[in-house]
Image (tube, coloured by chain):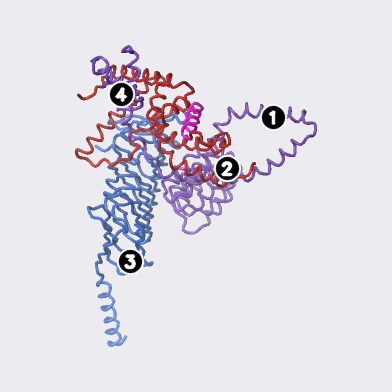
Chain colours: A purple, B blue, C red
Amino acid sequence: MMKCEEYKEHLADWHMGRLEPADAAELEQHLNTCADCREALAATGFVLDSINNLQDPEPPIQLKADFRAMLDDFKAKEKKSVFRGNIWSWLLQPRLPLAYGLVILLCIGGAYLLGRSNKQGQEAQERKQAMLLTMLDNPLASERMKAVNYTGDLKEVDKRLIAALLATLNNDPNVNVRLSTLEALAALGDHSEVRTGLIKSITTQDSPIIQLAIADVMLKLQEKGSVGSFRELLKQKGLDDEVRKKVKETITKLI
Amino acid sequence: MSAMKKGFFALIAILSCSRLMAQDDRQLVVHLSQPGKTFTLGVNIARAAINVSGYEGKDVLIQTDWADVTVQEKNNEVTVAAPRGKTFKLNIKVPQTAGIFKLSSTSAGTMKVSDVTGNLELQNKSGGIIAERISGSVIASTLSGRVAVSFRSVDPMAAMAFSTVSGYIDLTFPPDLKANLKIKSDLGKVYSDFDLVGDAAHPKVVRDEKDGVYHLSIDDWIFGRVGGGGPEFLVKNTNGNIHIYKTK
Amino acid sequence: MLQVKAGDLERMSLLFERHHRALLGFLFHLTQRREASEDMVQTVFYRMLKYRNSFTEGSNFSGWMYHIARNVLKDQKFGSGSKYDPISVHEEKITGGTLADERLEKKQSWQQLYDAMDMLSESDREILILNRVKELNYPEISEIMGISQGAARVRVSRAVEELKKIFVKKGIKRDS
């Protein structure tokens, strides 16, 4: 026979249907005689039901697509590492095994310690970038814009992503997506390939909204290398008046 | 010119005029392959004066005053096309279930969408954009003309953008909006009755009060978080004021 | 040995189908951050791919998955940025009328519950949300937490008692 204290510890299990039949029967018998424990059961049930009634979020369709992208990326990387494997087996042949063993242990140990702290960060970066690249191809402009906005959250941006952003700037059918992309690239202005890419797009963009924004960005970045392209742009027929005004101003301010 | 020739030309002129005047108002009913499920409406016609509104039915109804307009439907994707030519009216009624709208025109006046639900991508060139009582998200851009958008409810996860060169931008959101606003107007003022909060990265929210409405002075982009923050909304123009208000 | 087992990786896809919903729920109810939870789902599956060789066939997959999920949670550092309103997660269009009022009420009561759970200790909150996952049974829960079954039972019970006290403090009552 247990005391009430002990019975109370089993109330949650009973409510979730987790008690063995024998234990459940014993508890039920006790409950018949103990108003205090019945009260406790009601309160426990209420708490557990509240938690169980929380609605699970609906996973967005994107989640599966992102997983797929990550899986494909992973497969591709694994194929590459087959070669690395061969190098290891070469090293591990019986040639001064002890020395090699020590070196390997040290390397692994060091990498482990370093890796531990970087692991989460690096993994998150890799996955995020893979996801962004997929999102940049989404048929919805809203999703593409989100992807562009997210690049601001990445700590490091590699060449692949920069190329993807420049491609979006030059080819995306939606003006606002291109505008967001321009702003995202402006934030990456310290990468030389970004500057080169932006200067190139001066004469290829046809939307006045983008042309105006590029002028602002070039001024902000103090990129004198853009002056030549801006002068080219001024030669274009049918150039919007506002753009003409701004580009002239920008050239003056840059030289 | 001889009298006969004059008469001849006059006849031709009359005949041509009557042809022009004999435009019929066509009504097309488009049945969706899967009524009730998400549909897509795509219109990319330079000279179409586009007017889309939600209604209580299940089909997509198209009313136009030009005979050369064609419509295709495949798996709930409705595409309206027309050859190059004159400006014409395109009035479309859509179900109020969720839709993806990709509407683009260049020189036919103001584009108008009202009482619909879903994802809107609206592009115009020399004309404004009006989107009223939208439930969902809007990405709108035009060159000369205003952008006026009001929301019944906002998709909480969607990024949005509103841009024009010369024209005002007028946005109305439900008061519980949660978003990160990124606003720039070269020459106009920014007014808002939302509480815009700067953050550590962008503390510069300069404002002076007047009549209970904030006037924000411009210097590069203004970043302001509303309701604690959420997806990013880009708002940009060159000439014209920007108003971002709560639905009363 | 380092060869890619195509079958292996496709199996992960099937496991994703089966388990990602429950995993997302677990992470979301603990953090109330939707995007971060979606990110973490990907991280968990990424790690399971990476360390799939350390998983012995036949042993419980869910258990391993939640074990990794707990580690991912520990490694995660949230910025001070806002949690998006977690209730709007379901993108329900408010169409007005009594249905909307009901939904609004539900929203408010969920928010109350999240606020109450925020006041629990991390480990109490964790075990209550873990306990809630349908596909996990007690032996699995105790394995994930690294404690005995008896200890798991006591912890759940104590966490429930703590939450009861918080409910009283906050005036959360059941309608009799």
Measured Cα–Cα span from mark 3 to mark 2: 48 Å
Measured Cα–Cα span from mark 1 to mark 3: 70 Å
Which tag is nearer the camera, tag 1 or tag 3? 1
Q: Position of residue B106 (x, y in %)?
A: 38, 58
Element on which disc 1 rests:
helix
Q: Taking C8 as reference, is B77 left or right?
A: left
State the residue position of label 3: B69
State the residue position of label 1: A107
Question: Tag on residue A47?
Answer: 4
Mark 1 residue crowding within 10 angstroms, few (<14) / some (14–19) / many (20+): few
Q: Earlier in the sequence, mark 4 or mark 2?
A: 4
> Residue at 23% across / 15% down in the picture?
A35
Element on which disc 3 rests:
loop
- Amino acid type, residue under disc 3 in the picture: Val
Measured Cα–Cα span from mark 4 to mark 1: 51 Å
Measured Cα–Cα span from mark 1 to mark 2: 44 Å
Mark 1 and mark 2 in contact? Answer it, CB < 8 Å. Answer: no
Residue farthest along the top direction in this orientation: A3
Residue farthest along the right direction in this orientation: A96
- Amino acid type, residue under disc 2 in the picture: Glu
- Amino acid type, residue under disc 1 in the picture: Cys
Q: Are marks 4 and 2 on the same chain?
A: yes
Q: Taking C175 as reference, is B169 left or right?
A: right
Mark 3 residue crowding within 10 angstroms, few (<14) / some (14–19) / many (20+): some
Mark 3 and mark 2 in contact? Answer it, CB < 8 Å. Answer: no
Quadrant into which the C terminus of chain A falls:
top right
Which tag is nearer the camera, tag 3 or tag 2? 3
Tell me where the magenta segment starts and ends, as one range.
C61-76
- Amino acid type, residue under disc 4 in the picture: Val
Helix, strand or loop for the magenta stretch, by majority: helix
Which chain is disc 3 placed on? B
Which tag is nearer the camera, tag 1 or tag 2? 1
